[in-house]
Image (cartoon, grey):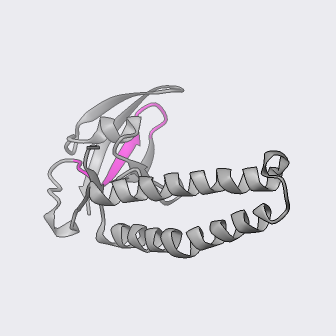
Amino acid sequence: MSELNYLTKETLMQMKEELIKLKGVGRAEIARQIAEAREKGDLKENAEYDAAKEAQGLHEAKIAQLESAIITARVIDAKDIDISKVSILSKVTVTNIANNKTVVYQIVSEKEADLKLGKISSTSPIGRGLLGKQIGDVAEIQVPSGKFTFRVENISI
């Protein structure tokens, strides 16, 4: 089985809703596309049929991925977060020592990561490098573009 997938209750609900939609409306739509393509004649030379079958395979893979993520999900409540150190769902204010620029990140699961919203994955290089750090700690983090050195300024929820 996969490793645990830490999520907020809201994200888990969104994933369950998406799974229901994919299994219901999504499967029905792909079945309709396959039936429509089948009516167009010889399946050996029917590009539309091949495309519909490929879409079906991708759709089923997405369903399997979502089911796996839901099965391995562990819901974390904000009130259970220890803010004495950086952990999943905590917001951490860090200063990049090289340019003295301050940034706030929220450490989240891969499913919730959205850099535009300041949410970084706990499995990303920066997320992994910050986990477990306390206020005042310095983290040297190797990323594909080089090395960053961050000082943890604050931890909150």
Query: Is 70 or 11 nearer to us in this picture?
Result: 70
Image coordinates of residue 82 in percent, x first then y, are: 14, 56
Does residue 112 appear in this view? no
Which residue corresponds to the image point at 43% horizontal and 53% vertical from the top-left?
A: 65
Q: Is residue 89 magenta?
A: yes
Decide: is 84 above or below 40: above
- 80 left or right, relative to 87: left
Which residue corresponds to the image point at 47% horizontal and 70% vertical from the top-left?
A: 18
Query: Is 54 or 20 nearer to us in this picture?
Result: 54
Decide: is 6 above or below 36: above
Q: Quadrant of the C terminus?
A: bottom left
Image coordinates of residue 77 in percent, x first then y, are: 21, 67
- 38 left or right, relative to 41: left
Q: Main secondary structure of the magenta part?
A: loop
Image coordinates of residue 126 in percent, x first then y, are: 39, 38
- 105 left or right, relative to 39: left
Which residue corresponds to the image point at 39% horizontal and 34% vertical from the top-left?
A: 125
Does residue 28 appear in this view? yes
Q: How many marks?
A: 0
Decide: is 88 above or below 152: below
Q: Quadrant of residue 94?
A: top left
Q: Quadrant of the N terminus?
A: top left
Image coordinates of residue 48 in percent, x first then y, are: 80, 55
Residue most toward the front? 42
Magenta region: 86-100
Query: Is 39 or 91 nearer to us in this picture?
Result: 39
Q: Is residue 79 magenta?
A: no
Query: Is 72 or 63 nearer to us in this picture?
Result: 63
